[in-house]
Image: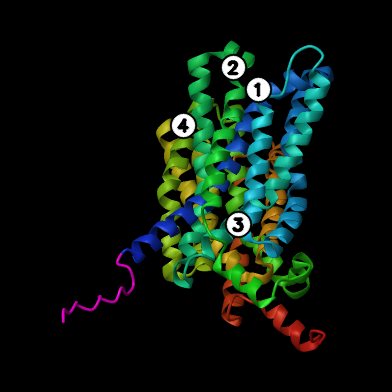
Amino acid sequence: MTTHPAPTPAGPPASAPARRHTATRRVAAAATVGTALESYDFYAYSYFAAFFAGPFFFSALGPAGALLASFATIGIAFVVRPIGAVLFGHLGDRIGRRSTLLITIALMGVATGLVGLLPTGEGWAAFGAVALVILRIVQGLSLGGEWGGAVLLATEHADARRRPFFASLPQLGSPIGSVAAGGLMLIMFFGLGPEAMAAWGWRIPFLLALPLIAVSLYLRWSIDETPVFKELQASGAREKNPVWAAIRTQPAAFGVAILVALLGIGSYSLMNTYTMGYGVASLGFDEMQLLAAATIGGLLQFITVPGFGWLATRIGSARVVALGAFGTLLIAFPVYLLLSDATFGVLVTLMIVGGILPTASWAALGGTMQELFQGRHAYSALSVAYALAAVLSGFIPYLTGALGTATGGAWWHPGVVLAALSALTLVGAVMAMRMRRLGDEGIDAAQAVTRELVPEPA
């Protein structure tokens, strides 16, 4: 009788770790690409609003009115952002993180692309103005649901030990988008010239969103729903009204999350918006010098953001936020004192040093906020808290300018704002560390007291 060797048991495939590593990288890319497109859209539209939106769509208001109207279209996206956070936060906690992020990225990309197709010229100004406002509202709604979902997509696919690092990766979207938009605008202005830019070149940055959205949709379509949401779905633990559930059970966590986010978001508004104009108008720097310094600082964030994310896996996200806030508090006034009489080399050094410390708070923001809120309403809580912090931060350039006027342009007035942001975030980070210790999964003490005094209905 002929015998044959028994087949060797297959066992786990040797390539399983490699496949898991590839899947993790794809999830990280899918999470990061949306925040990058968000930042790209913000800066591309900011340049467009500064140079072209007024003359194209609001010329009937006069030069000053047209400029104000064009800047108001920037603010519209911030105003409606909390509405988008409530809407898409609800969907993210009800139908899933992946499905909701497919919707937000599609809306963002299509709306951005359509801006590049708006008609201009005689007879089209009124239509263009209305269409532009509508598209900015769509973008703002979409942005409200993007960041919280991106953080959850990155972290809920990772094991608990590595979540702080993966939570930092969506934060890379900000420097990626700002460097891409700023670099593209510089190349186009130098390559095409002002006349070609006004005639048709301004459309290119917006139309580029269409192929970018195709890549983004592919990345997000090709990944699975997060294990955390699958478990919630399988166990029937999804909240019927996740936004209200988050507010009712974790009110203190919302306040802490907003405080934690202020420096990371607000310093960007202060450094890259107000300080740019202040540096040109009051300190005598050339626009290209400031843009070059900011670009160098943005490129450095490609290293510092994941670096601080790695540090958060060792000492905790809230501690990294606290370290960044404390360090920024120490340098807030010296930076602006030295900036008042700086050469270009000193300017670059100050922009780098002044950017690294707030970047620590920015890089660890997602990890800190993700630890504060429970999975069953995490999408809603993260999105709403971040959107409210972003709205508050949107007023920072205006408030800093008002303080500068009130103090006669004193060199220290931006330092006051930066120091205040640092102090508030430091307080928030310390409170977040305490909440993390008091709960197994970041459930804050207020929720524990609420459960004892007001038991859930049977």
| Residue 235 image point, x, y percent | 65, 77
Q: CA distance from mark 3 to mark 2?
A: 38 Å
Q: Nearer the viewer, mark 3 or mark 2?
A: 3
Comes first in the chain, label 3 or label 4: 3
Callout 1 crowding tier (Cα within 10 Å): few <14, some 14–19, many ≥20: some
- Sequence-wise, the earlier of marks 1 and 2 is 1
Q: Are marks 3 and 4 in contact (CB under 8 Å)?
A: no
Read off the residue under disc 3. 98
Instruction: Give the residue type at disc 1.
Output: Phe
Pointer 3 local density, CA inside 10 Å: few below 14, some 14–19, many at least 20? many
Q: Nearer the viewer, residue 420 or 167?
A: 167
- Image height of 382 relative to 172, above or below: below
Q: Is residue 145 above or below residue 165?
A: above
Q: Does residue 159 show up magenta in the picture?
A: no
Magenta residues span 1-14
Residue at mark 2: 197
| Residue drawn 51% across the image and 45% down it | 335
Q: Are marks 4 and 1 in contact (CB under 8 Å)?
A: no
Q: What residue would you read off at disc 1?
A: 51
Please, what secondary structure does the residue beneath circle 2 have? helix
Which disc number belongs to residue 292? 4
Q: Classify 265 as above or below 74.
A: below
Give the crowd class for mark 4: few <14, some 14-19, many >=20 residues within 10 Å: some
Rendered residue at 34%/72% (across/down): 12
